[in-house]
Image (tube, rainbow, N blue to C red):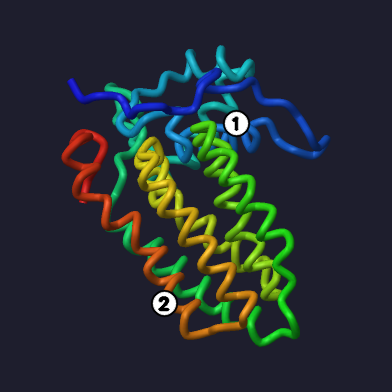
Amino acid sequence: MSPSPPLLPTGPVLSPVVRHRPSARTSDRVHDELVSAIRELRITPGASLSETDLAERLQVSRTPIREAIARLADAGLVRVVPQVGTRVGLISLREVEEARFVRESLEVSAFEATCASTAPEVGTLRELLERQERAYRTENFNAFFAADEALHSEIFALSGHPGAWQVVQRSKLQLDRLRRLALPDSTGVRVLIDEHRAIVDALERADVPSGRALISRHARRAMELAPSLREKFPDYFTE
């Protein structure tokens, strides 16, 4: 039997979906909750999904569950085998590497565009670094991940191309699962924070060569951890 990932998010695996917008379809809300749960490893790679169980946990009927699962299958996030059942897809290292390429390429461009502007305002980035430090001290890895994401999003916002971050987000679900699996390593988190600080320092100086090198090294760190994580959780991965 494969081990479960350590220190996964606490609390319910799934939360009942709530209609925040009158126009939001139930199946859309179910889809978004399942994508988030898969991304955050609240539902682990290879886990079996039951329409009946999901409907009970999300407090919806089975019809929107079925529609959401069909969308997840089209996106390759789950596998539906007739007469057998539905399972969450494994972490694809090929897709992780593709996501790394997209993220690194776009974030280097965002960094360069921000440096080309007059006196980049890094106050929000500094605040996010402090949030990461607090999360590190309290070993709140969920809070760290949220602050990590917010910092990178802010770099894209400063560049004048915030929509490019949404492109990155859509491409990196597999990468995020790998990152979440690695997070309980506090030494690794310390390294990530130090790299974030170096990137922000370079941005404040408008030091494009240093920033380009720092972002490239930072973006590739998750792939460096892939072999050890795959050895520890062999049933969670595929090529």
Residue 205: give x, y in percent of width and height: 62, 80
Residue beneath label 2, please? 213
Above-or-below relation of 59 to 45: above
Q: Earlier in the sequence, mark 1 or mark 2?
A: 1
Q: CA distance from mark 1 to mark 2?
A: 40 Å
Image point 26% across, 57% down: which residue?
A: 224
Q: Secondary structure at mark 2?
A: helix
The one nearer the camera, 178 or 215, is: 215
How busy is the neighbourhood of tag 2: few (under 14 within 10 Å), some, or many (20 plus)? few
Q: Horizontal placement of 140 versus 184: left or right?
A: right
Q: Which mark is residue 47?
A: none
Residue 210: give x, y in percent of width and height: 47, 80
Above-or-below relation of 85 to 74: above
Q: Quadrant of the N terminus?
A: top left
Above-or-below relation of 44 to 171: above
Residue 60: give x, y in percent of width and height: 63, 19
Residue beneath label 1, please? 30
Image point 54% across, 26% down: which residue?
A: 65
Q: Secondary structure at mark 1?
A: helix
Outermost residue toward the right in this view: 22
Q: Amino acid at mark 1?
A: Val
Q: Looking at the image, do the residues carrying marks 1 and 2 touch, with CB atoms under 8 Å apart?
A: no
Q: Amino acid at mark 2?
A: Ala
